[in-house]
Amino acid sequence: MEEHTPQRVGVFGGTFDPVHSGHLAVALEVRHRLELDRMLLVVANDPWQKTVFNSVTPARFRFEMVRAAVAAANETIGASVLEASDHEIRRGGRTCTADTLAALDAQTGGTDLFVVVGSDVAASLDTWERPEEVQRLATTVVAERAGSVGGRPPPGWEHVVVEAPALEVSSTDVRNRFRNGRPVLGLLPTPVIDYVRSNGLYGSPR
Ligand code: ATP
């Protein structure tokens, strides 16, 4: 009988408001280190843990920015190493990683899933919906984030740690920079900067 090695698929969810170089460095490093076949950047439809405090940019804009960033990265690398996923946007409603993993598991059948979080998020994994299902369906990967080094999942939560390049960039800082007319070059891909400006996002002049 033919041997079948399961595909290894990374699931990196985020608000991506906007996607920046820190996100891309994590996605590429985890894919490389864990020898993943696919790495999905899954755009949250309604990241409820954020929207209780602040409004976020409509999902279709955030997805278009991830799509532009992924296209630029793939073109530079010369291979389709990253994928933009609108799975959660098409499903609608509140973001629920357990649902996303369950759907991917059902769709792909026999895939090894890896759910990727930054170390600033790791400690709060128990606040996600159905955390035990997340643990059952995927291997948790913690990417060290500059400024949050050492953040780990709650006790008993199995995980692997990947040291990503420490890039001290956040979407919050990038949004503030656009709003205040400060430099953004180098913090996010040029096609994303162009998209932000041509759509007048984050208070940037069109
Ligand atoms: P915001 O500043 O609006 O809170 P953010 O920069 O944290 O946004 P998110 O889209 O919320 O970006 O993050 C998605 C995932 O990427 C999270 O798991 C987060 O920990 C991780 N992440 C974001 N920025 C970095 C970075 N610079 N290095 C490592 N991980 C990061």
Image (cartoon, rainbow, N blue to C red):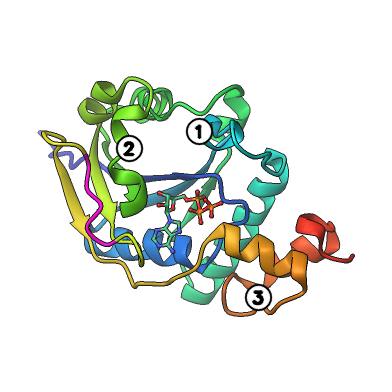
The residue lying at 24 percent from left, 42 percent from top is 140
Q: Earlier in the sequence, mark 1 or mark 3?
A: 1
Classify mark 1: residues with Cα within 10 Å, few (<14), some (14-19) or many (20+): few
In the picture of the structure, the residue carrying the numbered disc 3 is 184
> Which secondary structure, mark 1?
helix
In the picture of the structure, the residue carrying the numbered disc 1 is 49
Q: Which mark is residue 73?
A: none
Q: Position of residue 20 (x, y in %)?
A: 55, 64
The residue lying at 17 percent from left, 39 percent from top is 4
Q: Which mark is residue 124?
A: 2
Task: Give the number of the mark in front: 1 or 3.
Answer: 1
Q: What amino acid is at disc 1? A: Gln
Residues at marks 1 and 3 touching, judged by CB atoms closer than 8 Å: no
Where are the magenta residues, as a range? 149-153
Cα separation, mark 1 vs mark 3, equals: 26 Å
Q: Is residue 201 left or right of residue 111?
A: right
Q: Is residue 195 magenta?
A: no
What secondary structure is the stretch in magenta mostly built from?
A: loop
Classify mark 3: residues with Cα within 10 Å, few (<14), some (14-19) or many (20+): some
